[in-house]
């Protein structure tokens, strides 16, 4: 509508107030969506980096193998096999 047609309304002030209220509500809604998106983005990046940190810092699991050889007794580190002889 052109300004001349809007001014022709008897309740021009009411129409203008409704427009301002609707405009404010749209701005609040857009701001809310933006904040929600930003929070979801932050949480997502936190969890991605938190999982990456735990994978990088985790100690590798050592695989031990026991070899069965006849006549060889297992010893602990620092012990000598010749102590009993």
Image (cartoon, rainbow, N blue to C red):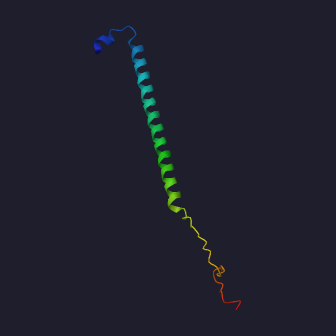
Q: Is residue 5 left or right of residue 29?
A: left
Residue at far bottom of view: 85
Tell me residue 2's x, y (percent): 28, 15
Q: Is residue 12 left or right of residue 48?
A: left
Of 69 and 78, nearer the camera is: 69
Of 45 and 14, nearer the camera is: 45
Q: Residue at x 48, y 53 (%)?
A: 49
Residue at far front of view: 70
Count of number-bearing discs: 0
Q: Residue at x 50, y 61 (%)?
A: 56
Of 75 and 14, nearer the camera is: 75
Q: As displayed, is residue 28 above or below residue 71?
A: above
Of 74 and 11, nearer the camera is: 74
Q: Residue at x 44, y 36 (%)?
A: 34
Tell me residue 30's x, y (percent): 43, 31
Q: As displayed, is residue 75 above or below residue 64?
A: below
Q: Is residue 36 left or right of residue 9?
A: right
Which image quadrant for residue 69? bottom right
Q: What quarter of the picture does the N terminus occupy?
A: top left
Residue at far right of view: 84
Q: As displayed, is residue 19 above or below residue 54?
A: above
Q: What quarter of the picture does the C terminus occupy?
A: bottom right
Q: Residue at x 66, y 84 (%)?
A: 79
Tell me residue 5's x, y (percent): 30, 11
Q: As displayed, is residue 83 above or below residue 48?
A: below
């Amino acid at each position: 509508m052109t300004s001349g047609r809007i001014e022709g309304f008897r309740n021009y002030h009411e129409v203008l107030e409704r427009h301002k209220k609707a405009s404010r509500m749209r701005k609040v809604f857009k701001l809310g969506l933006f904040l929600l998106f930003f929070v979801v983005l932050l949480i997502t990046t936190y969890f991605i980096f938190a999982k990456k940190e735990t994978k990088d810092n985790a100690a590798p699991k050592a695989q031990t193998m026991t070899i069965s050889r006849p006549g060889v007794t297992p010893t602990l580190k620092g012990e000598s096999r010749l102590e009993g002889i």
